[in-house]
Image (cartoon, rainbow, N blue to C red):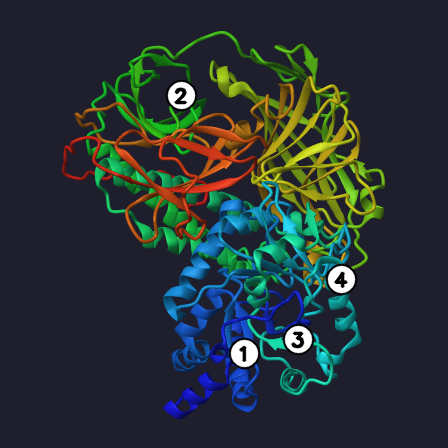
Amino acid sequence: MNLLLTLALTLTSPAAASSAGPDLSKERTLYAIGYSHLDTQWRWDYVKTIREYIPATLRDNFALFEKYPSYVFNFTGSVRYQMMEEYYPELFAKLKEYVAAGRWRVAGSSVDEGDVNVPSSESIVRQILYGNRYFERTFGKRSVDFMLPDCFGFPASLPSIFAHCGLKGFVTQKLTWGSAVGIPFPVGFWEGPDGRGVVAALDPGAYVSRIRRDLSADPKWIGRIESTGKEHGVFADYAFFGTGDTGGAPDERSVQWVEKAATEPTGPLHVAVTASDQLFRDLTDAQVEQLPRYQGDLLLTEHSAGTLTSQAYVKRWNRKGELLADAAERAAVLASWWAKEPYPRTRLETAWLRILANQMHDILPGTSIPKAYEYTWNDQLLALNILADTLTQSIEAIARHGLDTMTEGQPLVVYNALEIERTDVVEATVPVPAGTRAARVFDPSGVECPSQELRRVGDEITLIFLAHVPGHSVSVYDVRGARTPYTAEGLTVSEQSLANGRYTIAIDDNGDVSQIHDVVADRPLLSRPAGLVFLRDAPANWPAWNMDWKDLRAEPIDRLQGPVSVHVIERGPVRVAVEVTREGRDSRVSQVIRLAAGGAGDRVEVDTTIDWHTEGCCLKADFPLAVSNPMATYNWEVGTIQRGNDDPKKYEVPSHRWFDLTDTDGKYGVAILEDCKYGSDKPADDRVRLTLLRTPVCNSYQDQATQDHGHHEMLYAVQGHGGDWRDGKVEWTAARLNQPLRAFRVAKRAGMMKSIAFCQAPSDSVGIRAVKLAEDSDDVIIRFQELHGRDQASRHPLGPTWRFVGDVDGQELPLATETSSPTVLRLPAFSLRAVRYSGVDAFPRVLHKPTLTKRWVLPFDT
């Protein structure tokens, strides 16, 4: 582009106009947003997107810029811009000039237009952090909106997450696809569980809208703007025109009509052809307060339902990636602080970006073609291995810098990535101590822990033991040879029953768990046997996306039954377990029902392996409970939400990690915990069902007729508790289920400490969602969250060697801290708060020559 053309673009573009926006209390304004929707993978893969759709999007819009001086185009997803930068550098250089001129707008703030039902709250924060950082670094721009025109439902937690990240607005057009609550408003304020939120444009018309009239005189938009203005004092609305789903540019006739409406209007509306976030920038705080408000989920009745379960493995690897990223980051911070290990910022970002890109709204929900998932699984496994390696290196660095691993036997470093003190089962494989018949385990104080041999292979022994560890810590345990194994009473097991000090479990002739009795509370958890049921799954349309009310309200078509094989596979002082194997409808299911000792035995775990080849069905774990309530509580991480029994509008609903049914008297409840499942339903006051797998009948998209056929692994659990989910510490039980203690073999070295802890939860009602180093410095960023829906005040969790710097948002931009305290950590109900701390050395460093640990084999190694 020559200098004359650049000058002309600058002079004629909206960016060159006055920065003062319209007075929306008077000036009737329609924000016309030119947009191209690109599904990075869907009925095609990344290769086709890069070869065809990315260059066409660039060239088609460049041609329109040169013909229509008022035309402005919006495009989302930093990962797609990275594709442009890598594969089309000459076009990308030209693109940067159009961005600088205000013609091409980087939009949406995120890495990609991702699903928001399955990803963790921290993933959504990272979408915005890394997306806008790329835009800032590459173009000198940031967006203040989150654009999801085409996505399959939106959780009640979303506006609080957006507000935490400093965003002002949200846009979708998908509520016309059967919103369970209708469309609350065209433009209004969507409020999250903490009372914060964003302005939301919820009815902008289809993103493929073609314009064939003067928008300034369009009766539809005039009527809507007048209605909003008269009721709420804001005369504004938001309209898409564009194309999809393969990128490109709006059709030329639409651009002509929009240009005419903007420059030669014949009607009363001011048509602003502008950036996707301009409306949100133009609204004043006072005007935002006047807008209509909505709080709650924005789910799609049918179109959300199936996407919570389809393509189970991509969802499993996503959950494992999110958890391992958190564990690796926390270990890297600990290594940076304790061992002066360089923080692996680039490696962590690389892994995060592979996770985030594959949360795209047709990938993670499970609606893409099989070939697309070959690329996605590869990315997810690469991310997991990067993170596993980062975690291992961090633990090794800590172990060789002052950690005392000079033990009598084999030293193990046990790592707790959670911020809470906990007792849980640890599994480790170590060399068989020479000249001995057994192994015993001792804690950092030299006190023996309950331990149990699982198996021997060659010269190695795999054992489990109970470890009691501080929050966010590393602790040295000692595995010693012994003549006899550890023995203790307390756990019992047979093919028909299991028991610990908390629960007794009965297994019936069908292999179902027929009874769970809470010994401490003297309460049954089940009213009838809990089993696995098959439901007909034949949506009328969109098979991977939809589940239909007719199928969910019908009785199950079958129950998993015999022939049943039952075996006791673990019997010891740490854990007891029974394996139940059954076949039905061309699938084979093996479930290990297990109970642990001590504090680790506060839930009944069901470790499930399925070889799935069933067609036209979904498989649910059915829990007829001995508590009853028309409302259940579902975890959204940032807040919880209560939902009623199944009805024609809501009959398959999402949650993260747990959902809970507490009796109407509030005295007792039962929680269902899971490690990679997102959909469930509630057929009655006393019955809930967790959806495990689905392969629907297909009238179209025939590749989905065998989706998820193959091998699957999942873990779910049942926890009884006194009082409600808060009293039962259900959040922490679910966190422990998902983030296990990890053990690492290390070399023996003299050192100063047997255990090191960094950052512990200030209280049971305050969680920590992230511990990381800042993107722009070596300050520590800790993201806190209030868990119980009640305002909290506690002390900052770091010690006196750390200085409170101030609050930041989710993008790590500084916030006003006039009300912040360097000593008191205040958290409104369900709120997120990120705090920056700077630290000084707490201990002298004892440096040793590096000796690599044995690489720990994790279940995603490939």
List x then y, in percent, for residue 605.
58, 26
Q: Say whether disc 3 or disc 1 marks the residue closer to the N-terminus.
A: 1
Query: Residue tagged by mark 2?
Result: 467
Q: Quick one: SS at disc 4? A: helix
Disc 1 marks a residue whose amino acid type is: Thr
Q: Residue at x 50, y 25 (%)?
A: 764
Say whether marks 2 and 4 touch (CB < 8 Å).
no
Q: Quick one: SS at disc 3? A: strand
Structural distance between the alpha carbons of marks 3 and 1: 15 Å
Mark 3, residues whose alpha carbon is within 10 Å: few (<14), some, or many (≥20)? many
Is residue 355 placed above or below 752 in the rendered structure?
A: below
List x then y, in percent, for residue 148.
61, 61
**Nearest the eye: 606 or 776:** 776
Query: Residue tagged by mark 4?
Result: 230
Say whether marks 3 and 1 touch (CB < 8 Å).
no
Q: Which mark is residue 241?
A: 3
List x then y, in percent, for residue 731.
55, 30
Name the side, left or right, on which 549 lies relative to 68. right
Query: Residue tagged by mark 1?
Result: 57
Disc 2 marks a residue whose amino acid type is: Ala
List x then y, in percent, for residue 490.
52, 9
Image quadrant in which you'd find residue 516: top right
